Amino acid sequence: MVRIIIFGQGLVATHFAVGLEKLKNGEIPDYGVPLSDKIPVKYDELEIVGSYDVDTKKIGKTLYDIAKEVFENSNIPSQLKDIVVKKGIHLGSMKGLPFKVEGLEEEKGLLNAINELVNEWKALKPDVFINVITTEPANELYIIENIEKALMNKKLSASQAYAYAVAKYSRETKSSVFINAIPTPIANDPGFVELYKESKAIIFGDDGATGATPLTADLLEHLRERNRRVLEIAQFNIGGNTDFLALDMPERNIMKKKTKSSIVEDILEYNVPNYIKPTGYLPPLGDKKFVAMIIEYISFNNFKDELYVVARINDSPALAGLLVDLVRLAKIALDKKEYGTIYPINAFYMKNPGPKEAKSIAKTKAYDKLLEWLGIKG
Amino acid sequence: MVRIIIFGQGLVATHFAVGLEKLKNGEIPDYGVPLSDKIPVKYDELEIVGSYDVDTKKIGKTLYDIAKEVFENSNIPSQLKDIVVKKGIHLGSMKGLPFKVEGLEEEKGLLNAINELVNEWKALKPDVFINVITTEPANELYIIENIEKALMNKKLSASQAYAYAVAKYSRETKSSVFINAIPTPIANDPGFVELYKESKAIIFGDDGATGATPLTADLLEHLRERNRRVLEIAQFNIGGNTDFLALDMPERNIMKKKTKSSIVEDILEYNVPNYIKPTGYLPPLGDKKFVAMIIEYISFNNFKDELYVVARINDSPALAGLLVDLVRLAKIALDKKEYGTIYPINAFYMKNPGPKEAKSIAKTKAYDKLLEWLGIKG
Amino acid sequence: MVRIIIFGQGLVATHFAVGLEKLKNGEIPDYGVPLSDKIPVKYDELEIVGSYDVDTKKIGKTLYDIAKEVFENSNIPSQLKDIVVKKGIHLGSMKGLPFKVEGLEEEKGLLNAINELVNEWKALKPDVFINVITTEPANELYIIENIEKALMNKKLSASQAYAYAVAKYSRETKSSVFINAIPTPIANDPGFVELYKESKAIIFGDDGATGATPLTADLLEHLRERNRRVLEIAQFNIGGNTDFLALDMPERNIMKKKTKSSIVEDILEYNVPNYIKPTGYLPPLGDKKFVAMIIEYISFNNFKDELYVVARINDSPALAGLLVDLVRLAKIALDKKEYGTIYPINAFYMKNPGPKEAKSIAKTKAYDKLLEWLGIKG
Amino acid sequence: MVRIIIFGQGLVATHFAVGLEKLKNGEIPDYGVPLSDKIPVKYDELEIVGSYDVDTKKIGKTLYDIAKEVFENSNIPSQLKDIVVKKGIHLGSMKGLPFKVEGLEEEKGLLNAINELVNEWKALKPDVFINVITTEPANELYIIENIEKALMNKKLSASQAYAYAVAKYSRETKSSVFINAIPTPIANDPGFVELYKESKAIIFGDDGATGATPLTADLLEHLRERNRRVLEIAQFNIGGNTDFLALDMPERNIMKKKTKSSIVEDILEYNVPNYIKPTGYLPPLGDKKFVAMIIEYISFNNFKDELYVVARINDSPALAGLLVDLVRLAKIALDKKEYGTIYPINAFYMKNPGPKEAKSIAKTKAYDKLLEWLGIKG
């Protein structure tokens, strides 16, 4: 069994939980799970054993109750009745957003809060931790010493605190994997990578590669392979879920902009004026975002072509599908004892694949590297 | 030097001729030439030594004069003043199109016409032949015997007759390469491949991979690698050049539909209802075609996403840029003595890569195979 | 009360029946019904009293049963259990389509079939007849004499036969309205208009103005009012309902092309190269068609702008919503005794507004004329 | 003759000047000039007699020299050699933008600067003033007293100062028209309208209706007339000209957002969540902006449709074409002595038509009102 803990019981986590149980029940096909049955870890080996959130409306509720609110008419798997959301770490990660929140660290201090979590996990024996809290502002910490200082001064973000706790748990109890599906630099922070190596733990990250960014990566690769000169690229994103609400705040928008726009120069190897960032929040769009993109390029004989992409993408299911792979890859990575972070996994599944010095590559090239890492033929 | 003969002095050939001389003159960057300076054959080793057409308005004119009509205000390289279009083989390939045409075979019979061409080439010593005549109706011939029978009965298409002549020239004088950039099955015809092997000659083909089809291939691969289930795909194309006029005729449209839609099942490995074919002819669009595409697919948890692509693509320059690579690859292939047809080249540059039994693969995967064939690191 | 008969119990008629009953039950808002509560005829004055079809799978079924197949999970209004589909006139209108059909005229001859219908209606006392059979090939008949000749020779289309029957019923029993929501020329056939005038009956037609065509009309008007010179317009349509299947057949496609492309020159007053016609049939799209459009135009100082429209439109509900207005306008027209055909109604609701000599105008201008006819302030 | 002064010799003014002279020379068709030859004021009655700017690179140059930089290869009308750009009023309107600027008021004080302008105009005898300076931050002043106070405290924006000067000139010398083609509230400021009435002068304004906003207005009207319920609208704009650079600054962006988004509720008469504002600055796009739009709406029977618009619009020529009408309408308005502001003109040509209490209406309805005001039949 692969035992899973969730940080942030929002839309993505709820899609993950519902989809996973439906997969186990044979109620849905596994579309959107990239590796499907290509790897030996089966869906029914996966089990969610805990979930943490800071939204007071969610704390104490079961995943079943939360899922019922999200999926109005669908039948929710009854297995979710057994998982209750516990109070997690806040550290200001939801500051400014219109939710009533409470952090475990508020009553008892951060160190005690982390110890409490680690102790809970000693009983639950999780193998994998999924971080899908709302995009938060955060800074790189570079070295382990800084992480520890920040811990003392409560200058960590929630994700960083969770990542620290998971490392501690790995050190003290059993090796585990922290999947960082949001932009906070964890796999891209050499300090955390070092900490995880020392703790015999693994980070996958950062920022799950869904939506228009991986598509853009592959479009740019397509142009690069034809030696077409890209003049500029603009990619607009607008949606109505909590993440878009959060990304409407400049300090969070900048987190996403970094992970999204780095791909352009990494892939094309020259500088291209670009506008790639979350653009706005429009509630009626809900979780199905609207993406509009323009790419202009120079073709042979100096002729200019134009490419426009319009897409409607269900944001949360896309990431949830990747998570079904990532928790399974966590098992494989643990078996392989590849501690630290694993680029061939990050390169395909993440917008900003760690480690820090690694480049973004086209996702289709990353896919080949992933299969190679797995020892699978394409 | 690489000596080049052109069949069909239309827009593509004229873009190729003008662009090539401008490249040699350092007047334009080599955007749109995929391999750029990655291969050892340089642009100034390339020389056009002859051109054939059946349009009476073109026969006897220099490429310079023809280019002046196409590129209104641009300065045309003066080197093109030395190349005069000669009368080529018709065999009904332009039947029904509003052009006055004459075929070399009309006066002297097909066999004599072919002999005349082969004799001309013995003097010109071409290494490469580019076939860019207008899309014609044609049937596969399967075995060499059928080719010879068809030759006797004048049941060959113009491309097939040219391909036959090039094989004869290769046998009698020197090994050469026939680049078939149109849908007529040559590299996909086992009869021609066998004939070329016997003649120590090489075919690249069929149907140059420009426009929306290679982009579609890579988009489908992108979806396949995420295990998203494609529900349907429609791809509309409309343009105003002669090829769109020709493709408005059902017997020519079907030629293109075959090469365009085969990619879907080849890449996805399941059947997807699709509408992929040239859609119409609208003169004011000229050579810059309009492409509109829809792809719907199922993501995780059975959610449906939609992808729309709108593109404006200069049709002829795109293919001309590929031809600059293909004539250079011809040189390399001749040096390697890989007679018959070469899949790693066809797979990247062609819509319907030969040989017949070969599948279409994503272009980005084909690019890796091409580099591997060339011994180049990506 | 306004008593309604339906010809052709397909998707449109089923959406109309279901939507109408839901409106009467207060279960849905009246979105998509243009005049909403601006006219004095209320939804609960409307009553469907009969329906005819030639599909053997539908004949004898209730509208409730038919609706259940179309709207999988929705609750169907129970009122529809009372309406049973009767066998209608075929006259080859479904020829070539993959349905098993039977026409009332097959057993008893066309004249008898028409008489039987008229007699049924004498009992049912309908005020309005809606023609929404599948697009059929048909020719204009020009004068009443030709209609009668065609009747003798069975050279009428099904729509023409229905239209003839309704005129007869109007003459013999009570004035009524024939709403022709398909391309067959009825309101555009001077013979039928004359016949209706003589019969104290009214035609609304032809071809309900839904989908991209009315939008295109208003976009062209927008450009016209700025004196922008349209260079060309292409409008692709692809869908998966029966009408798209039918329109894939050339003789039916031409019917639609006529009603769709006439607007361009009517509105712009100069000739514009255009491609406006149903483009293909792709079953997975179902009733929600995909429309892609390009309009290029010259702006001030000879600069060229480009406009692309992509739309997803639920085909049948759109027309069904218009029908809710048209049956109510039928009541008003009957009260006004405006026999023949009524341009201010046709101009807004129809793709090809009759009478024949009338031009298409922008729909937004037609809307003003409609309000004026109704004596309503915009 | 209609004598014209320009404020702000940027792209729009340069397109206006070049286009106008070319029109007079018969070198271009009058596409993009809405009223074309429908009004009695002819193009060759129009004469530019002066131009003001604050960019030190432009002051002292002729319009010919400025045009040469903008239109690389085109032949520039030689008439433009006679018009030299003079130093205008700055008042911080270009603050924060990367241009070296100087204002006439800096050396001599604002009152003296205004007097100097008015005196110049007494000699030049202009009839019309066009305000096309870069979008500036500005506040409404409401009453004449506030305008005068702001003048004393230099709290006016440049546009407000120009507008004040034109009123003064009108009072002292001859009635004239101030065309405010930018978002600063002038026609929407009751203080200025009152001042103009008293000065026997006329304002047209505010913010020339080009680009996606008037198109959106007419699309919304199209949906309104079908009683479709709009769920949300997002309209992205990105371009590479100076105005987009300016609109990247929040205090200027807000000016444009106001004039752009007010149309939605004005036309639909209910509140619709929307995102309509300039979205970004991307230099390679130059003056040809990229617009992407989504509108989702509810059709009959509660079905949801989606409409996407992608457009490429040459920004400056579009407004320049409107200005050719507006200077001619100025002449007609002066002849009619309709002092203050004229809604039937503003409603069609302006994004935010004054006076303040007036609503935005669909442009196609405004067009009818304009023709009515002119006494012309549509």
Image: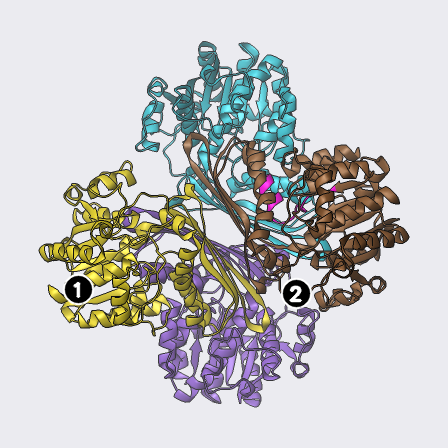
Chain colours: A brown, B cyan, C purple, D yellow
Instruction: Answer few, some or many: residues within 10 Å of disc 1's Cα (few below 14, many 20 plus, some between 14 and 19).
Output: many
Chain ID, mark 1: D
- Residue D317 vs residue C206, the one in the foreground: D317
What's drawn in magenta, residue-wise? A204-218
- Amino acid identity at mark 1: Lys
- Amino acid identity at mark 2: Phe
Q: Please tell me the numbered disc located at residue B274.
A: none
User: Disc 2 designates what residue?
Assistant: A99
Q: Is residue D356 above or below residue C221?
A: below
User: Disc 1 designates what residue?
Assistant: D168
Image quadrant in which you'd find residue C89: bottom right
What kind of element bears circle 2?
A: loop
- Residue C14 vs residue D349, the one in the foreground: D349
Left or right for A14, reference B369: right
Residue at horizontal 83%, vertical 50%? A43
Q: Is residue B296 above or below residue D333?
A: above
Residue at horizontal 50%, vertical 27%? B33
Left or right for A320, reference A264: right
Marks 2 and 1: CB-CB under 8 Å?
A: no
- Residue A270 vs residue C117, the one in the foreground: A270
User: Where in the figure is residue C52, as x and y percent of width and height?
Assistant: 60, 76
